[in-house]
Amino acid sequence: MKSGVTKEQLHSLIDEAYAKYKSYNGGKNADYIPYLAKVDSELFGIAACLPDGQIIQVGDCGERFGIESISKVMTAILILKLYGAETILDMIGADATGMPFNSIMAILLEKNHPSTPLVNAGAIAAVSLVQPVGNKELKWKAIVDNMRELCDAPLPLIDELYKSESASNYNNRSIAWLLKHYNRIYDDPELSLDLYTRQCSMGVTARELAICGATIANDGINPVSKKRVFSKALAPKITAMLASVGFYEHTGDWMFTSGLPAKSGVGGGIMGVLPGGFGIATFSPPLDASGNSVKGQKALRYIMQRLDAGIYNSN
Ligand code: GLU
């Protein structure tokens, strides 16, 4: 591996991190979406995918959970493919907001200044850009097909989660209409909100997220299917987005302590990308106050600190 990390080294660190944090108690399941509050808090898994497609997994890596915000990375890739990096920078942007994922304040403060597809406002705008604009069914097919190519697996919709989130997403509805007010949404706001809610309600496993992370780490070629999913030139753009806003207002602390560009979701997943190295994912539902999995952060930090191979290292 380019990072100099061997499979054996990574495997034993994953085993160690799993054993060390398995019984750690801290954080709380998201409860603003009723479905998420009911998920078993004890579930815990760590998976990695190497550039040759080998998978390392320990714990509950086959358990399907709500992908939530990690879907934002996948749809960001889709619109980067459709429009190119320059246009997306112009229409949405790549700046961290420094605020919570669902901040309305961030939109008010940056009304003439784009933010990023990795927070709710930018993600709803990203969904609005998926082609063909105005055609809900074909847009949804494009989103789902893209997820399948990235994860090398067809992700199913968790219908109960979709219903639960649709019945409680008033804040996101405000975001969609506020974007309309500022001309920063590019399809019907209700259509875009519904597809955004659906993509967040897809079920994914830690194993599948590790494969998606490895596809980004591997410059757009899925190491399991061996298929090119996106162009090499887009990989550093996606990694830059992860490194600047993947953990919302705590991304700086996260990058400072782990060196691993990663994206969290309120379903308890984290997907990490070590460019030229590997994709790594964790699943554990209890979250900190910003919506990031507590155990997942501890495990990944443990692994990355011992590997000493973060993106800011010179080796
Ligand atoms: N669907 C969630 C929301 O829009 C995603 C949030 C997250 O995972 O950070 O509130």
Image: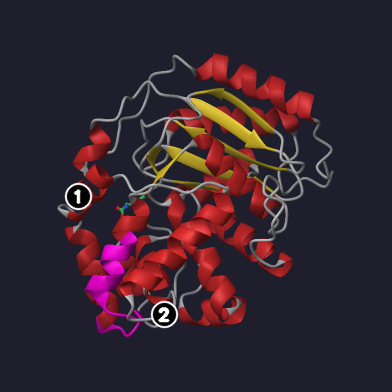
Where are the magenta residues, as a range? 181-196
The residue at 35%/68% (across/down) is 124
State the image coordinates of residue 314 (x, y, percent, origin top left): 82, 47
Per the image, the residue denoted by label 2 is 132
Q: Residue at x 69, y 57 (%)?
A: 227
Which of the pair 116/77 is nearer the observer?
77
Determine whether 295 is above or below 131 in the image. Answer: above
Q: Which residue is mark 1?
A: 163
The secondary element bearing badge 2 is classed as: loop
Q: Which mark is residue 276?
A: none
Q: Residues within 10 Å of mark 2 (few under 14, many from 20)?
A: some
> Which residue is found at the position 26% from the left and 64% from the top?
194
9 above or below 179?
Answer: above
Q: In 3D space, how far apart are the residues under numbered discs 2 and 1 (Cα atoms)?
A: 25 Å
| Relative height, residue 243 to residue 158 (above, below) | below
Residue type at the position of mark 1:
Lys
Left or right side of 199 for 11: right
Position of residue 162 in the picture relative to residue 95 (left or right): left
Taking depth in this image into account, of 118 and 279 the one nearest to the observer is 279
User: Which three-letter amino acid code belongs to the residue tagged 2?
Assistant: Pro
Q: Does dot 1 land on a helix, a strand or a loop?
A: helix
Q: Is residue 157 above or below residue 93?
A: above
Q: In which quarter of the view is residue 221 placed?
A: bottom right
The picture quadrant where one finds residue 4 is top right
Q: Is residue 97 visible?
A: no
